[in-house]
Image: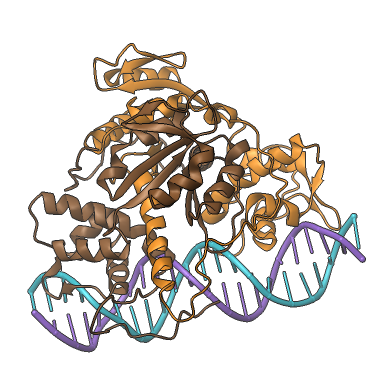
Chain colours: A brown, B orange, C purple, D cyan
Amino acid sequence: MSQHRPGGPNGRAGGVPALPDLPEATVARLPEYLRALHNLAEAGNDTVSSEELAGAAGVNSAKLRKDLSHLGSYGTRGVGYDVALLIDQIEFTLGLTQRRGVALVGVGNLGHALAGYAGFASRGFRIAALFDADPARVGELINGLHVRHISDLADVAVAESIAIGVIATPAASAQDVADALVAAGVTSILNFAPCVLSVPDGVDVRKVDLAVELQILSFHEHRKSSLTALPGGLGGGPAGLVSAAEPEEAVGT
Amino acid sequence: MSQHRPGGPNGRAGGVPALPDLPEATVARLPEYLRALHNLAEAGNDTVSSEELAGAAGVNSAKLRKDLSHLGSYGTRGVGYDVALLIDQIEFTLGLTQRRGVALVGVGNLGHALAGYAGFASRGFRIAALFDADPARVGELINGLHVRHISDLADVAVAESIAIGVIATPAASAQDVADALVAAGVTSILNFAPCVLSVPDGVDVRKVDLAVELQILSFHEHRKSSLTALPGGLGGGPAGLVSAAEPEEAVGT
DNA sequence: TTTTGTGAAACCATTCACAGCC
DNA sequence: GGCTGTGAATGGTTTCACAAAA
């Protein structure tokens, strides 16, 4: 599987620059750079150095530069990066120049919150439809959208040109929902249910499991607390505030 | 890197096996194995092969075996792993044998949902206190807990022996909240606000950004749709259901 | 024979350090 | 002089393939 397509050196004249395929690790960081850049732009910065931008995104500058170099980047030596230009570059790369439609399935506790999350709209997505399997919830109005029954999924997905499905159901129904999404032509799924989904090749699934995040933190807590018992000590106490002041100003959600 | 502590084969009789430090990638997968194991146990399995367990956890078996070998694992050649034993091992490693207290700050849209999320309680955590900066919300009863003002954080953190803080506030206040958590002695933070936090050494931060997940999916959508335009084609259509049947049965949340 | 545990190989990601350009 | 872009070095992760154990 190793090599990418041979087509190679992407300095093509005309249209689309034919997406060089980026390392996954880089892709996962681009959204973070984008957020930091938007903050900088709002604060009135025209250019930014790799050092500054890296700081605002929480990475080191070498990594940032290497990441950006993969996009065939647009920096100027001795100066830095043009903020506006870089925003455009990254938004194009992430496919955010078209606002993608998202279907949210499961309007329970979490689904309800996601449906109301302003961060989606403000970062390039449009929640286009809400679904639930429970007939009692169908018709409910959430954030300006009516909840529809999941059996309507296929019709709505086409009509609203849904690209991405978000599953916020209990684990027991998640696979059925995934099957329905795939059958409706959805090829990207964000899964909040704590279970593994199986989907055909060509469909991407990303999983977010809130309890897993806590468990990972728990591991480190566990390790830290057993270290304090050790000879070397490592300074056990609550460690007075050190937090370096940050340019990061943050737009409201 | 290769070798763990020289003390090696940890069939020690008495006390704590003194945590070998695991690769981060392994730590991040243990919770997934644990979930799969709980499902298997509920389904009545006593033992499981690496192949089966890997399938249920969505990884390949070589990776699973290497991960488990880092815990000085307890498999039997020719047979597989003892499910109950492995559950204990992983729970111990993750520090889940003690139920950790969690403070949740910010009871807006998302915070509200997190406060009601049953998955936390069922997987080793106890939401011990809710906080908000908005006086209008203080006193509100959510899922059996009263919302308290954030100025009480330090007192409550000690009284309830809070180990982990969850930030579900807007980005603009997240750094202040993080500072307050750190000052109160919290050394692990799960941050849902879309911003970078700076914290002293020794404090762990994990970040979950819902919009970032969608943006990563968007990238792959973008790539897929530009590939369909290419000569090779790669089979563009919605691809009929292939989803292999899975043992995965899933406990309700 | 089945299945684990693990060296060795391959792969991917991060960091270093500096040449090249502004 | 300052800063980007990038080869080369390093370090971590995944995969392979098989010896050893039950």
Q: Position of residue B81 (x, y in %)?
A: 78, 49
On the question of residue A222 being in view, the answer is: no
x 53%, y 36%: residue: A169
Q: Position of residue B218 (x, y in %)?
A: 38, 57
Task: Describe residue B112's horizontal placement relative to residue B86 as left or right.
Answer: left
Q: Nearer the viewer, residue D20 or A125?
A: A125
Give the total of numbered labels: 0
Quadrant, the N terminus of chain B:
bottom right
x 51%, y 42%: residue: A209
x 32%, y 60%: residue: A30
Q: Position of residue B62 (x, y in %)?
A: 68, 63
x 50%, y 40%: residue: A152
On the question of residue B229 being in view, the answer is: yes
Relative to B105, is B29 above or below? Answer: below
Quadrant, the C terminus of chain B:
top right
Q: Nearer the viewer, residue B108 or B197?
A: B108
Task: Describe residue D16's horizontal placement relative to residue B206 as left or right.
Answer: right
Relative to B245, is A130 above or below? Answer: above
Relative to A81, is B100 above or below? Answer: above
Q: Nearer the viewer, residue A47 or B231?
A: B231
Task: Describe residue A126's horizontal placement relative to residue A162 as left or right.
Answer: left
Q: Position of residue A114 (x, y in %)?
A: 39, 36
Specify the quadrant of the image occupied by residue B149: top left
Specify the quadrant of the image occupied by residue B169: top left
